[in-house]
Image (spheres, rainbow, N blue to C red):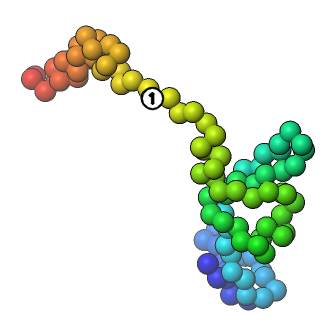
């Protein structure tokens, strides 16, 4: 997204002025976690690249997928499997207005 040098006017009348043309880019998310040694790790959805990494205070950079792999995500059974009779009864009740 580029904003012209004279700024951008918003629908509600506020105006932002920039001294020159700017390209606004960014990450959707960046999570910071400090390890046992006190060093910071940054986890992002996309690679920051060397230039952006050099601007950040973290010592280590990773993809967000690496963090997700550290967690055990259990297989959660479906409610119909856990309580089949109750599930069937609620299904019947939900269908009841269809017959009216």
User: Residue 2, how many percent across, how many down?
Assistant: 64, 82
Q: Quadrant of the N terminus?
A: bottom right
Q: Residue at x 27, y 14 (%)?
A: 84
Count neighbours of disc 1 (C-alpha within 10 A) and say few if under 14, some if 14 to 19, many if 20 or more.
few
Q: Is residue 15 left or right of residue 19?
A: left
Q: Residue at x 84, y 69 (%)?
A: 55
Q: Which residue is mark 1?
A: 75
Image vertical order of residue 23 relative to residue 67, above or below:
below
Image vertical order of residue 8 relative to residue 26, above or below:
below
User: Residue 42, how many percent across, how many down?
Assistant: 75, 54
Q: Residue at x 72, y 83 (%)?
A: 22
User: Residue 44, how many percent across, how many down?
Assistant: 67, 57
Q: Is residue 95 left or right of residue 2?
A: left
Q: Nearer the viewer, residue 83 or 23?
A: 83
Q: Nearer the viewer, residue 46 or 91?
A: 46
- Quick check: can you spot residue 30? no
Q: Residue at x 61, y 36 (%)?
A: 71
When asked about the image quadrant of residue 30, the answer is bottom right
User: Residue 79, how many percent across, how many down?
Assistant: 35, 21
Image vertical order of residue 37 relative to residue 4, above or below:
above
Residue furthest toward the left?
A: 99
When asked about the image quadrant of residue 62, the answer is bottom right
């Amino acid at each position: 997204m580029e904003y012209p040098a004279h700024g951008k006017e918003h629908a509600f009348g506020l105006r932002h002025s920039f001294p020159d043309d700017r390209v606004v880019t960014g990450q959707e998310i960046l999570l910071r976690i400090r390890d046992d040694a006190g060093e910071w790790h940054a986890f992002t959805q996309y690679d920051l690249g060397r230039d952006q990494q050099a601007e950040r205070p973290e010592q280590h950079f990773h993809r967000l997928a690496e963090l997700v792999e550290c967690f055990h995500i259990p297989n959660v059974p479906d409610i119909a499997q856990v309580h089949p009779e109750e599930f069937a009864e609620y299904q019947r009740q939900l269908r009841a207005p269809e017959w009216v």
